[in-house]
Image (cartoon, helix red, strand yellow):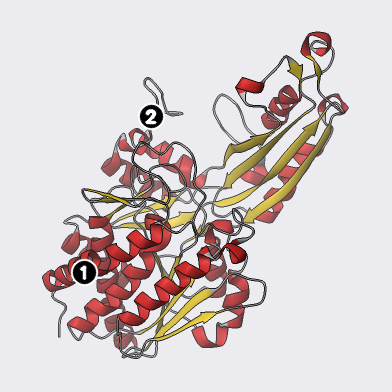
Amino acid sequence: MSLNSNRLAEFCRKHWEESALPELTRYIRIPNKSPMFDPEWEKHGHMEEVVQQFVRWCKGTNISGLQLEVVRLPGRTPLIYMDIPGQSPHTVLLYGHLDKQPEMTGWREGLGPWQPVLEGDKLYGRGGADDGYATFASLISIMALNDQSIPHARCVVIIECCEESGSPDLPFYIDALAGRIGTPDLVICLDSGCGNYDQLWCTTSLRGLVGGRLDIEILEEGVHSGDASGIVPSSFRILRQLLDRIDDCKSGNVIANEFNAAIPAKRIAQAEAAATVLGDTVYTKFPFVQDGQPLLKDPAELILNRTWRPALTVTGADGLPAIANAGNVLRAQTSVKISLRLPPTVDAQTASQKLKSLLEEQPPYGAKVRFTPDWSAHGWHAPETEPWLEEILDTASLHHFGRNAMHMGEGGTIPFMAMLGARFPGAQFLITGVLGPHSNAHGPNEFLHLPTAQKLTCCVAEVLAQHYQHVQQQT
C-alpha cells in the first residue's frame, strides 16, 4: 500500500491541533529549566512534572506494541525511553529533549517564558520549539503511518532532560541502554533549525562550543576613581586586551589556528545555494536596532560564518554594578562568561586548552587572571547522504511544503550528535527542526511555528516509510 500524502497531512494536522497543541500549552507553563540553570531541579520538581505529563500523553497514543520506560540513573536527570516495534528488524533512532533554557529578559508585553500565548499560527513561550515539540512530532509521525497501514522499521525514541546543559548525563544513558538500542541505521534528530518556514531544512553540520568564566582582579578592593585612574589599570581594560588575543574586534575573525578549520567544498556550495534561497533574510531576521548592520552583507559568507567559522561572544558579566548604583569607583575586578563557537571538525578539548592558555599567560600589569572552563562540546559533520534519503527528503518537502528540501549547516551545538556520529559511523542522519526566523530560542519571545511543526511531522513519516522500503530492498 502506498502512502497517501494528503491523508497523511490531514492526520497530522488533526492530531497536532487536537492533541499536541493542548499538551504543549501545558508544558510551556512549567519552568523546567535545565540543571545548569536550576541546580535544585530535583527538589523543585518541575522536571518530574513534565516527564510525567509526557509519559501520560505518549501512553495515550495507543501505538501498538509501544514500550515506555522512564530510565533513572543515580544522580542524573531522567530519560524517557520508548521502543516501538516495526515490520523490519532495522532500527531508527529518534531524539528530542524536554529541558528548557532560563527565562531571559526582554519579552514583549503580553508574553513571558512560562506564559503560553497562541497568536495566529505561533505558540509563544519557552521550550515549545526548543524542543518540547519533538516528542509529539516523533510519535504522531508513527501514528500517521499506522493509520494507513504503512510499514516502518523498529523505532527507538529517546527524550532527554539535560540537553540545554550540554547533555552531560546522556552518554551514561546511551552506555546503559546500548544493548537495548542496538545499532540504528538512521538517526532523526528534531532539535535543529530551519532557514525559512517554506521548505524542509536538513542540517549538515553543527558547530562545537567551548566556554567558561574569566575572572580578572587588579585590586584587593575598589578605590576612588579620581585617585586611582591613570595609575591603576581598569580591570575592564585588561579584559579588552585579553579578548583581543582571541578575535579581531573589527572583523570578528578568531585568530588562533586551533579554533579554525578548512571548509569542505560541498558545504561551501550548499551555503551558496541556501544563500540564493534566503537572500538578505540571513541577517534581516535578527532584531537589529534602527540602522544596525551585520558584519557584512554577502549571504553566503554570513552562512559560512555562522556554520563553519569560530565566533566569540561574551554572554554574561559580574563585578559591574547597576548603573543606578555605579559610583565613581575604579572597580577591583571584572568577571565575564565567554562562549566560543567552533567549526564542526575542531577538537573541543584542544580548543578549550588553547583558550585557557591564551587568556591566562602573561597577564597584563600582573593582574590575577583565571579562566575556568565549563563547556567543551564537539561539533558534528554529517556523513555523505545516501541517494535514497536525499531523494525522499526532496519528495517529502515537495509534498508538504511545495518546495525542494535545502541543506545547510547550523551554528548551534547539539552534543548528542557528535556522540552518536562517533558511536554509529555507518548511520544516516536527518537533523532538522522548527527554529526558523524570529523563533528566538534561548531568547525572549520564543515561538513554535505550528504549520512548520505539522509539515515536518509529515516529512518524518515519509522518511520512515521510505527507509523501510530501502532496507527491504537491501535484504
Farthest front residue in view: 44
**How far from the left and from the top, in percent, is residue 451?**
22, 56
Residue 321 falls in image quadrant:
top right
Residue at image point 52% right, 87% down? 180
Q: Nearer the viewer, residue 185 or 416?
A: 416
Residue 8 falls in image quadrant:
bottom left
Which amino acid does the dot numbered 2 rest on? Lys
Please indicate, yes or no, whether residue 31 appears anywhere in the rendered image.
yes
Crowd tier of the residue under label 1, counting other residues whose Cα lies within 10 Å: few below 14, some 14–19, many 20 or above: many
**How far from the left and from the top, in percent, is residue 47?**
52, 65
SS state under label 1: helix
Residue 349 falls in image quadrant:
bottom right
Please indicate, yes or no, whether residue 191 appears anywhere in the rendered image.
no
Residue at image point 19% right, 55% down? 403
**How far from the left and from the top, in percent, is residue 331?**
76, 23
**In the rendered view, does 304 fall on the left or right side of 333?**
left
Crowd tier of the residue under label 2, counting other residues whose Cα lies within 10 Å: few below 14, some 14–19, many 20 or above: few
Which residue is label 2 attached to?
Answer: 297
Q: Earlier in the sequence, mark 1 or mark 2?
A: 1
Q: Which mark's residue is nearer the viewer, 1 or 2?
A: 1
**In the rendered view, does 441 fall on the left or right side of 367?**
left
Q: Nearer the viewer, residue 254 or 200?
A: 200
Is 154 rendered above or below residue 8?
A: below
Which amino acid does the dot numbered 1 rest on? Cys
Quarter of the figure that contains the C terminus: bottom left
Which residue is label 1 attached to?
Answer: 12
SS state under label 2: loop
